[in-house]
Image (cartoon, coloured by chain):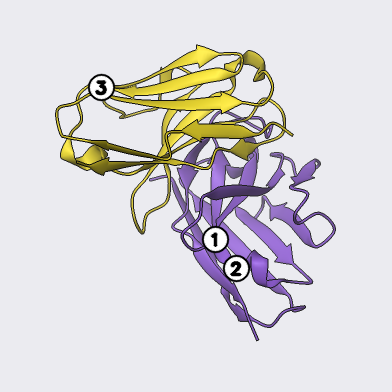
Amino acid sequence: EIVLTQSPGTLSLSPGERATLSCRASQSVSSSYLAWYQQKPGQAPRLLIYGASSRATGIPDRFSGSGSGTDFTLTISRLEPEDFAVYYCQQYGSSLSFGQGTKLEIK
Amino acid sequence: EVQLLESGGGLVQPGGSLRLSCAASGFTFSSYAMSWVRQAPGKGLEWVSAISGSGGSTYYADSVKGRFTISRDNSKNTLYLQMNSLRAEDTAVYYCAKADEGVIINDAFDIWGQGTMVTVSS
């Protein structure tokens, strides 16, 4: 089983700043089968990024994904008020598993 | 509009059973793998089970293997999760989720339902 570890656990930033979220896998994720989701309180998760770097339909271009192998990054270039939420990475190259999440909070 | 609607959650005693349903609309249901993902109160996401588009292949997390059964009825556009021998640690919101691209389970989830709450308590 591939274990995903996200860091930091909580990230405190202000609107307009750049956010960098990390996801590290315990073994290489094949074919960069890694996705990122955003979840707001009381809502279902929303797909942001798939294939490590492809934006899902309707996702603003301030969201970008990068990485390969065991190290992946979600970057939000300029934070908007609606971006403050919890973010999860997920690998789907070997079975399916999620990271524990990063909470992005307003500073 | 592509939509998933879960139902069947509720309060059940430890050791009891419950069957969740997920009604799909707005897409060709049989063309996509489907999964169940759960979220315990205040916790993160945990993948539970997946099924291929045809229903011929099923997969389970170790935490539910032997207790939960995933199935689908493509004629009714409905996904199911039969949960037996329920434990307190199964308490969670259960989401059904659609595979982004196709029939195999190795995929991201592009559409999620709103979730249904399962509480296991005496």
Q: What's the distance in space between the residues labelled 3 and 1, CA to CA?
A: 30 Å
Q: Which residue is mark 3?
A: A62
Element under disc 1: loop
Q: CA distance from mark 2 to mark 3?
A: 36 Å
Nearest to viewer (mark 3 / mark 1): 1
Q: Residue at x 61, y 63 (%)?
A: B21
The vertical placement of A50 against B5, above or below, is: above
How dense is the environment of label 3, judged by Cα within 10 Å: few (below 14), some, or many (20 and up)? few
Confirm or deny contact between disc 1 and disc 2 (CB under 8 A): yes
Residue at mark 3: chain: A
Q: How many marks?
A: 3
Which of the 4 image quarters holds residue A99? top right
Residue at which label 1 appears? B40
The amino acid type found where label 2 is placed reads: Thr
Specify whether B2 is left or right of B75: left
Instruction: Return the residue nearer the eye: B66 or A25.
Output: A25
Q: Nearer the viewer, residue B89 or B3?
A: B89
Visible residue check, residue B108? no
Quadrant position of the C terminus of chain A in the picture: top left
Crowd band around label 1 with a 10 angstrom C-alpha radius: few (<14), some (14–19), many (20+): some
Query: What's the residue at 60%, 18% (across, down)?
Result: A70
Q: CA distance from mark 1 to mark 2?
A: 6 Å
Chain coloured yellow: A
Which secondary structure, mark 2? loop
Compared to residue B10, the image places residue A4 above or below, namely: above
Subunit of label 1: B
Q: Which residue is mark 2?
A: B91
Where disc 3 sits, the SS reads loop
Q: Nearer the viewer, residue B114 or B11?
A: B11
Percent x, y of residue A30: 67, 17
For chain B, what colour was chosen?
purple
